[in-house]
Structure formats: C-alpha cells, structure tokens
Image: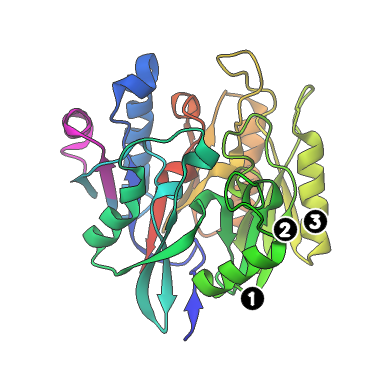
Amino acid sequence: MTVLVPAEWAPHRAMWLGFPSHEELWREDLRQAQQEVAALARALAGPGGERVRLMTGGEAGEADARALLGEAAGVEIVPGRFGDIWLRDTGPIFVKQDGADLAQGFRFNGWGGKYVYAHDNEVAGQIADASGVALNANDFILEGGAVDHDGAGSVLTTGQCVLNPNRNAGWTQADAEAAFARAFGATRTIWLGEGLANDHTDGHVDNLARFVAPGVAVCPVAYGRGDVNADAYDDAARRLAEAGLKVVRVPSPGWIESAEGGPAPASHMNFIIANGAVVMPTYKPGQAAELAAQALQSVFPGRKVISLPSNAILTGGGSFHCITQQEPA
C-alpha cells in the first residue's frame, strides 16, 4: 500500500474555506473577519483558479455568507457545523492511497484543550462526505497546521507542537514519525523547534516554515526592531539548511500587537497556494509586506502573489492557511 500527500502546489479540484459564523466568538471583529474571508474567497476563485467550497457553521453564518458571496462565481456555499473556522486543523488531510483519494482524519482536542467547541470533531467527516471521499479515522491527535508536505514523502513539523504532552502524552520523535509514515506515507520528518510567541497552537509549522518546491523551503527573517520571534526564525533556518534544503528567507511582519498588548502570532508564512495564485496575509501596509510578497513571487514564478489583509482573522489566532484545506485533483 502506497500513501502520499500531494504537495500544496500540485493541482486542486477544490479549496475548502471556513466562514466566520459565530458572533459570540468573534464579537466586534465578526463583520471585518467576514469581509476578509470574502475577499480571500474571491481571490481564490478568480486569479487563484479554485473551486471554492465555503463552509458555514450555522444559519446566521450561512445568511451572511450568501449576502456577501451568493453571486460570486466559483464560490459554492456549503452549510455545515463547526465550532470555528479553522478547517486546516479540524478538517481532513487528503492523501492518495494506491492512487485513490482518501481523507485522513485525526482526533482533535482543541489545541491541547485550550478551545473546545461543539462540532469541531465532526468537521473532517463533513468535508469527506461532501467530497465523496472515504474518511480514515486515525487514533492520534493532530492538527493539519502542525505538518507541511513536499509531495515526495517529507514532512515538516515542530517539536513544540507535535511532542507537546497536551496532544499525545508520552510521544517521542520515533512515535510521531511512525504515525506520519502510516497516515502520510512519510519517509522523512524534518523537525523544527519553537514556533511563534503567543501562538495558541503551540507552534504550528505553517506559521514558521513552508515547503514551496522540491528541496526548497521558506521561513521568516526578523523585520525591524522588537521582533520577539527572531531567534525562532534563525533556528528554523539553521535546521532547514542542515536538512539539506535550500532556504529562502522572507521578511516577517515585524511587531504586530495583539488586543492584549503583547505580540500577535502574525506571519507571512500563513499563505495559501492556489492553482493559479499564492495569497499572502498582511497585517499592516509598508515595506515588510512588500518585500515578503516579492520574496514569495521569486519562488512561485508561475503564480501571481496576491496580498490581502488578515487583521480581523488574526484576532481569532490564525490566518489564511489556517482556515483553508485543499482537495487534491
């Protein structure tokens, strides 16, 4: 039996996208978050060349989605149930098993018990059913944002998250690698260390480093004074290089302040690779975002890099990659 996770830059037949649907969670940020997700949906369906499947989490969210995107070409509104929009973590990871489609689902415990909402543990099954793909339920805890794939058997992850005792207590690197081999057909796991400060995911790799081509990865370089993640960025770059990868450094957003006054886990790494475009989140206008887009354009010469604001989405703890999940062709 051969299992493989296609690289994100491989062709997709659909892109799943979560739509903010619960005012009690998003409060004063709900409308702006909905507008940001709507802009992302239009970019994915337009220059991104995607069939966007926009999942809503309740009747109110569905009504808001139809008001914003009901007439948008290439956007299909899919009524569903979820605790919140983070489909990368609650949804399945699609793989090819002996050439056939399979959706790998995992146990989900609200990022180590921090945010446990009704229906989040049902999202993988809903997406698999809507896609007409069988779901395989793996008996270990994992979020999709904790792993990145190169399409050739390599997995990129962080020890801070995957080996955290609030996920699979007692797991070692060997345990994780064996689980990745079974679920993803992984033949190599590249271990990074700490993720971003104040990231409630405990250091998801899709905020820290990403595969962008065979043998090539991107990770941030600190921009401006006061970037509290500078050491984590440099450590990730060192580990990637030691693993034999070509490393392209992309300017970070720099200091982005949270509502509580500390650093927000803002990252240009949370881009989404669509069929015809790469959509990168931004958090403030200026040189950092411009240079980051230029750096990504250099590694995606065949795709248009589109920068869109993600400030309201960030108040929920993530950005574009966190709320999407690609369905490979």
* Kind of residue at disc 1: Thr
Which mark is in front, 3 or 1? Answer: 1
Label 3: which secondary element: helix
Name the residue tied to disc 2.
191
Q: Which of 175 and 71 is in front in this view?
A: 175
Marks 1/2 in contact by CB < 8 Å: the verdict is no
Name the residue tied to disc 1.
187
Name the residue tied to disc 3.
239
Q: Which of 87 and 255 is in front in this view?
A: 87
Marks 2/3 in contact by CB < 8 Å: the verdict is yes
* Kind of residue at disc 2: Trp
Q: Which residue is drawn at 78% across and 51% down?
A: 237
Q: In this view, does 60 lie above or below 146?
A: above
Q: Residue at x 83, y 53 (%)?
A: 238
Residue 28 is inside the magenta segment: no
Rounded to the nearest angstrom, the CA distance separating label 2 from label 3 is: 8 Å
Seen in the image, is 325 located left or right of residue 230? left
Give the crowd class for mark 3: few <14, some 14-19, many >=20 residues within 10 Å. some
Position in image of residue 28 (x %, y %): 37, 14
Rounded to the nearest angstrom, the CA distance separating label 1 from label 2 is: 13 Å
Seen in the image, is 231 located left or right of residue 119? right
Look at the image and give the residue range highlighted in magenta: 53-72
Dot 3 or dot 1, earlier in sequence? 1
* Kind of residue at disc 3: Arg
Q: Which residue is drawn at 26% across and 37% down?
A: 57
Rounded to the nearest angstrom, the CA distance separating label 3 from label 1 is: 18 Å
Specify the quadrant that holds the C terminus: bottom left
